């Protein structure tokens, strides 16, 4: 999508970031992918042998370039963990592929970048407690499945109850909100939940999926949150992470407004808030 180029361009234009703040990741190795995804599924991706039905579920025509993109995104989120440890926060302009399960892809997601990065973090630091905060409008069903039996990763998803996926997974905590919810009601749910969750989980590290498909202009969202409300959401999440000294990696997630400017502006707000609070 065009937004992946437009977001950094806009941020550089505004002086929020410089070229020195950007990095280009390589790709994850097969061994790193297989910490999260089933070998049989990975082999199908690698050799482009998904069935037509499996391909339809992903929403994308399968190609070598697409598979490369997924392991490139995963590497970016994994590299972000190092930067988050150093600076408190780090952000992947892409990512948020939370509909990818351990053994299949769905909803424009083939491999789960947050899950792969979290498992790599646990490989290197097995005693870590990780919190996934998924505030995309759609439930993080793939992430929930991957970590359903992993007590070191707590999955929290706050999403629209009457949106994709039709069959929801089971996160450690799911908050299903009604369609057409507006700023105050949406933010009240977040304000009442996240601080208590941090106290309960006591995370050493967090991943935040900051999808902007909650805004009113989004054609796939079903919420009525304003751009300012979305910005307030990000501010609160970052404020809580910083106050509790929890390094956080941010993946951008969804955004499907008809006007690309609405998507870019909402995503750029996430970076603006991070700059304000951390730097």
Image (cartoon, grey):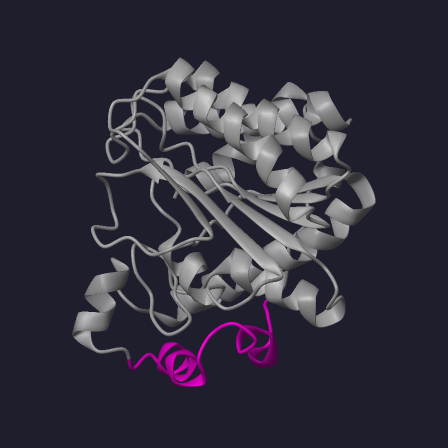
Instruction: Please state, as top left, top right, bottom left or bottom right, where the C terminus lies in the image.
Output: top right
Q: Could you tell me which residue is drawn at 61 percent across and 31 percent down? A: 195
Residue 76 seen from this side: no
Residue 240 seen from this side: yes
Based on the picture, tell me whether residue 44 belongs to the magenta stretch. yes
Q: Could you tell me which residue is drawn at 30 percent across and 20 percent down? A: 224
Frontmost residue, 208 versus 65: 208
Based on the picture, tell me whether residue 183 belongs to the magenta stretch. no
Q: Could you tell me which residue is drawn at 34 percent across and 70 percent down? A: 104
Residue 3 image-quadrant placement: top left
Extreme residue toward the right, this view? 86
Residue 195 drawn above or below residue 73: above
Instruction: Please state, as top left, top right, bottom left or bottom right, where the N terminus lies in the image.
Output: top left
Number of numbered markers: 0
Q: Could you tell me which residue is drawn at 47 percent across and 74 percent down? A: 37
Q: Left of 86 or right of it: where is 76?
A: left
> Residue 136, how many percent across, how many down?
41, 39
Extreme residue toward the left, this view? 53
> Residue 103, how many percent across, how many down?
37, 74
Residue 77 drawn above or below residue 199: below
> Residue 197, how many percent across, how many down?
58, 39
Residue 102 drawn above or below residue 5: below
> Residue 117, how many percent across, how many down?
61, 61
Frontmost residue, 108 versus 24: 108
- In this picture, which residue range is highlighted in magenta? 27-49
Q: Left of 43 or right of it: where is 73?
A: right
Frontmost residue, 272 versus 248: 248
Residue 244 drawn above or below residue 105: above
């Amino acid at each position: 999508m065009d937004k992946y180029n437009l977001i950094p361009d806009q941020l550089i234009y505004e002086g929020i970031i410089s070229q020195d703040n950007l990095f280009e990741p390589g790709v994850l190795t097969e061994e790193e992918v297989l910490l999260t995804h089933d070998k049989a599924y990975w082999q199908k991706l690698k050799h482009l042998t998904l069935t037509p039905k499996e391909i339809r579920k992903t929403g994308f025509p399968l190609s070598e370039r697409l598979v490369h993109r997924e392991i490139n995104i995963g590497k970016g989120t994994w590299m972000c963990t190092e930067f988050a440890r150093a600076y408190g926060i780090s952000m992947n302009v892409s990512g948020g592929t939370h509909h990818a399960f351990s053994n299949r892809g769905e909803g424009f997601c083939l491999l789960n970048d947050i899950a792969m990065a979290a498992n790599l973090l646990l490989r290197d630091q097995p005693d870590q407690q990780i919190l996934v905060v998924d505030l995309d409008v759609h439930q993080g069903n793939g992430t929930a499945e991957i970590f359903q039996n992993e007590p070191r990763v707590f999955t929290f998803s706050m999403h629209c109850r009457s949106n994709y996926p039709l069959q929801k997974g089971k996160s450690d905590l799911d908050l299903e909100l009604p369609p057409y919810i507006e700023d105050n009601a949406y933010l009240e749910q977040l304000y009442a939940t996240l601080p208590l969750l941090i106290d309960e989980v006591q995370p050493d590290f967090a991943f935040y999926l900051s999808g902007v498909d909650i805004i009113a202009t989004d054609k796939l969202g079903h919420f009525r949150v304003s751009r300012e409300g979305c910005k307030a959401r990000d501010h609160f999440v970052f404020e809580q992470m910083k106050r509790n000294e929890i390094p956080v990696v941010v993946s951008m997630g969804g955004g499907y407004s008809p006007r690309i400017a609405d998507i870019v502006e909402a995503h750029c707000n996430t970076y603006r808030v991070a700059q304000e609070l951390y730097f």
